[in-house]
Image (tube, grey):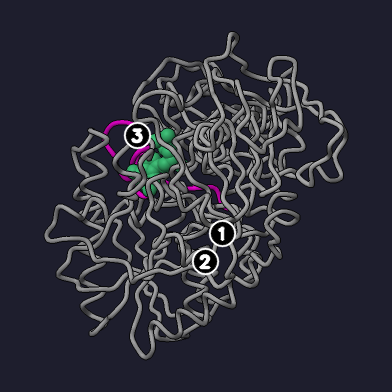
């Protein structure tokens, strides 16, 4: 028997978040970049209303953004900035404390990154994690040296008799997750060791100025009490109030959009996904009919998707929405195209043409709304010293051709995907929209391997519909990052009744992931796979064989093209 799926079965948390998945519009806009001029600039963004925050100083750890996420889960606003960010950029965040992240360097190496002096001069609480702790040690007069043993993985932390508020409410020993090669050889003056593990005599240190260091990683799931430690730091040590809630966010954003847009007009390209839906709903709440949504049916959507999106936005949410039925235009452009990148380019360019045509018909439009998320901002941030390598260019945030002269509104710029879902729920969006799995901008065109034709799209739609229905019936839809079908261009021999068949091979893909940068194939139950396979070969003419994709990302990608 197959194991039931466990979306947390792999340590996904080690991944650097880089894409929201639901980035269709951004994709098109990125492709359109080559079509002339510079990207329009987003309107100057300041801090969200909650005038308190914790700032993560990033030294390049793969977990840095995860620290910000964990702190926000405690209802405290948190942003990550590069270690060389000047104070002027941080001051508007009104920090109540700093967290220094881990990082790959060794503090005793030449040119190793260190915390800027304002961190210590501010007299605000500081929590150094792993490399961050070593930076504090080095900068405040202690000594760091290569450890005789590297320490990776699980360890047991034992607190010393002197209890710090960092560990308020916690047991005197707890499992923690380590990942370091260097160790604290001598504490800086004024610091005490507050905990130890078998291999680290100083696993936690602190002084009476509220500067602390943790040798372990509290932000990863493998440190079960880690969030409680971060919460203690934010509330008990930094004195945060925990006012970062999605309902505060909504109130503040709506007020801000009202002020920014005034009597102007806004257009928003709807994709049917959660990000563009939340953007549209926030803006609609703020300015009502000054917003027009454009939804392009490119003929590459899933079955019933067009009707579903229209119904939700027009009927349920009462928005101005223009649906453009352009399937034939897209299919004509895709004729004979088999290369995946060419497909993306063709689709992106056609989208922009249609979007521009429609925007022009509307008359004067001032703003373009986009569902850019915080991980996208971090990814594309020029100041991010440690921004991870871009895995695929089609995931980047882009802009429309400058000739459109639109100012960007990006109300989700500060949010993680899970926060967007919370906002969607608070805004009363239907559950099926809030929890919709990401769907790529080029749609089914990159799931029909080889040439995209009307007939092959129809076959894929039928197969995909069965996959989705069965996954939903098995109540697995929400646990999966994505689940879908692929129509390959392989044909194979089969037998049905007493007859030979020669039909297409369809593939099923279902993955768990936190962020789409890495993904694990989902351990779907065998009987579910059997049901899906039986239904496909019985109900979809033209398909006589079904395979399940059991590769993870990396080395594969989620989509086949
Ligand atoms: P890959 O295939 O790179 O996909 O593992 C990662 C995530 O991105 C989505 N994806 C796209 N989204 N335009 C998009 O808007 C694209 O061209 C594109 N290609 C992949 C994919 O569905 C997954 O969520």
CB-based contact (under 8 Å), mark 2 and mark 1: yes
Q: Which mark is residue 389?
A: 3
Q: Where does the image place residue 383, in percent across and percent down from the top left? A: 33, 49
- Mark 3 vs ligand 1: CB below 8 Å: no
Q: Nearer the viewer, mark 3 or mark 1?
A: 3
Residue numbers of the magenta segment: 436-458
**Mark 2 or mark 1, which has the lower sequence index?**
2
Q: Foreground: 422 or 86?
A: 86
Q: Could you say which quadrant of the image residue 422 lies in?
A: bottom right
Q: Which mark is residue 278?
A: 2
Q: Secondary structure at mark 1?
A: helix
**Residues packed near mark 3 inside 10 Å, few (<14), some (14 to 19) or many (20 plus):** few
Q: Where does the image place residue 349, in percent across and percent down from the top left? A: 20, 54
> With 505 as the anchor, is 358 left or right in this view?
left
Q: Foreground: 158 or 510?
A: 158
Q: Residue at x 49, y 33 (%)?
A: 61
Q: Is residue 439 magenta?
A: yes
Q: Where does the image place residue 543, in percent across and percent down from the top left? A: 46, 28
Is 183 situated above or below 487?
above
Q: CA distance from mark 3 to mark 2?
A: 28 Å
Quadrant position of ligand 1: top left
Q: Foreground: 422 or 232?
A: 232
**Mark 3 or mark 1, which has the lower sequence index?**
3
Q: Which residue is mark 1?
A: 420
Q: Secondary structure at mark 2?
A: helix
**Mark 3 or mark 2, which has the lower sequence index?**
2
Q: CA distance from mark 2 to mark 1?
A: 7 Å
Q: Where does the image place residue 268, in percent across and percent down from the top left? A: 37, 70
């Amino acid at each position: 028997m197959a194991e039931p799926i466990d979306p947390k079965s792999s340590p996904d948390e080690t991944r650097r978040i880089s894409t929201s998945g639901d980035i269709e519009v951004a994709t098109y806009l990125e492709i359109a970049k080559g079509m002339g001029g510079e990207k329009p600039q987003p309107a100057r963004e300041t801090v969200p209303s909650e005038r308190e925050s914790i700032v993560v100083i990033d030294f390049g750890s793969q977990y840095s953004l995860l620290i910000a996420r964990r702190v926000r889960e405690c209802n405290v606003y948190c942003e990550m900035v590069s270690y060389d960010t000047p104070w002027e950029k941080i001051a508007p965040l009104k920090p109540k404390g700093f967290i220094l992240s881990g990082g790959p360097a060794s503090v005793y190496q030449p040119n190793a990154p260190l915390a800027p002096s304002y961190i210590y001069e501010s007299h605000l609480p500081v929590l150094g994690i792993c490399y961050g702790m070593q930076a504090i040690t080095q900068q405040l007069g202690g000594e760091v040296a290569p450890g005789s043993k590297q320490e990776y993985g699980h360890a047991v932390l034992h607190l010393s008799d002197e209890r710090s508020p960092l560990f308020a409410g916690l047991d005197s020993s707890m499992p923690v997750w380590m990942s370091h090669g260097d160790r604290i050889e001598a504490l800086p003056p004024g610091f005490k060791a507050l905990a130890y593990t078998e291999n680290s005599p100083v696993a936690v240190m602190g002084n009476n100025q509220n500067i602390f260091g943790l040798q372990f990683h509290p932000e990863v799931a493998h440190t079960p009490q880690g969030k409680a430690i971060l919460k203690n730091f934010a509330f008990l040590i930094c004195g945060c109030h925990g006012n970062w809630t999605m309902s505060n966010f909504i109130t503040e954003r709506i007020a801000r959009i009202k002020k920014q847009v005034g009597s102007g007009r806004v257009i928003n390209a709807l994709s049917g996904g959660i990000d563009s839906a939340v953007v549209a709903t926030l803006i609609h709440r703020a300015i009502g009919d000054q917003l027009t949504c454009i939804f392009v049916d490119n003929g590459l959507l899933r079955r019933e998707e067009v009707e579903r999106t229209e119904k939700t936005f027009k009927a349920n949410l009462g928005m101005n929405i223009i649906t453009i039925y352009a399937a034939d235009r897209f299919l004509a452009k895709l004729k004979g195209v088999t290369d995946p990148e060419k497909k993306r380019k063709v689709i992106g360019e056609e989208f922009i043409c249609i979007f521009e045509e429609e925007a022009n018909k509307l008359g004067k439009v001032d703003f373009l709304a986009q569902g850019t998320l915080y991980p996208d901002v971090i990814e594309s941030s020029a100041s991010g010293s440690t921004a991870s390598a871009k895995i695929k260019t089609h995931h980047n945030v882009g802009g429309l051709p400058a000739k459109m002269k639109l100012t960007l509104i990006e109300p989700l710029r500060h949010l993680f995907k899970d926060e967007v879902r919370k906002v969607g729920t608070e805004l009363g969006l239907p559950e099926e929209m809030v929890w919709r799995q990401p769907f790529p901008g080029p749609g089914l065109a990159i799931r029909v391997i080889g040439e995209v034709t009307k007939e092959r799209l129809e076959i894929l739609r039928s197969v995909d519909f069965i996959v989705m229905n069965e996954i939903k019936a098995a109540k697995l839809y929400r646990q999966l990052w994505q689940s879908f079908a692929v129509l390959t261009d392989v044909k194979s021999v089969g037998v049905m009744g007493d007859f030979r068949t020669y039909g297409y091979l369809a593939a099923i893909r279902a993955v768990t992931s936190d962020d789409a940068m890495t993904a694990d194939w989902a351990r779907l139950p065998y009987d579910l796979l059997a049901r899906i396979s039986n239904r496909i070969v019985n109900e979809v003419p033209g398909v006589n064989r079904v395979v399940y994709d059991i590769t993870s990302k990396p080395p594969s990608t989620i989509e086949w093209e």
